[in-house]
Amino acid sequence: MQTSDLLFIGIKGSVIALDRATGRQVWVTHLKGWGFVNLLVHDDTVYALCNGEIFCLDPLTGNGLWHNPLRGFGTGLATMALAGAVPGSSAPAVAEQRHRAARAAAAAA
């Protein structure tokens, strides 16, 4: 299996890899908490931001390659960017921020 055969999903503090052809779950890695997970896949590496921490995962196994708690920056939403990466890769985080703002406005009304 190759990285291009997989679909990566970030949900509730976890990253899930599915076989793109069958939808079968290949692996799941639980990161931290139950929050929004922002994903970036580049050069056969999966980067995941969750609860103010970044995780680097092997795309074929889900095993952690490294982790940085990003101490001192809080646990809010975060985006990632790589030089030369496809523009708009932060769109899921922007959509989540809008969703949170709409929920807060509705609760305040």
Image (cartoon, rainbow, N blue to C red):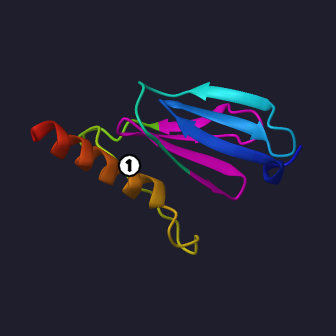
In this view, the residue in front, 55 or 25, is: 25
What residue is at 50 percent from the left and 68 percent from the top? 88
Where on the picture, by quarter, is residue 17?
Answer: top right
Residue at the outermost front position: 109
Residue 20 shown left or right of residue 95 in the figure: right
In this view, the residue in front, 12 or 47, is: 12
Query: Split into 4 quadrants, where in the image is the N terminus?
Result: top right
Query: Split into 4 quadrants, where in the image is the C terminus?
Result: top left
What residue is at 78 percent from the left and 31 percent from the top? 26
x and y, in percent, of residue 75 in the image: 29, 37
Specify whether residue 42 is painted magenta.
yes
x and y, in percent, of residue 84 in the image: 58, 75
Magenta range is: 40-67
Determine whether the residue tagged by mark 1 lies in a helix, strand or loop: helix
The secondary structure that dominates the magenta segment is strand
x and y, in percent, of residue 48 in the image: 52, 43
Label 1, on which residue?
A: 96
In this view, the residue in front, 32 or 22, is: 22
What residue is at 35 percent from the left and 39 percent from the top? 52
Residue 12 shown left or right of residue 101 in the figure: right
Location of residue 40 with respect to 88 vertically, above or below? above
What residue is at 25 percent from the left and 48 percent from the top? 102
What is the total number of numbered labels drawn onto the structure image?
1
x and y, in percent, of residue 56 in the image: 57, 42
Residue 6 shown left or right of residue 94 in the figure: right
Amino acid marked by disc 1: Glu
Instruction: Specify few, some or many for label 1: CA neighbours under 10 Å numbering under 14, 14-19, or 20 or more.
Output: some
Specify whether residue 64 is painted magenta.
yes
In this view, the residue in front, 9 or 106, is: 106
Location of residue 88 with respect to 19 vertically, above or below? below
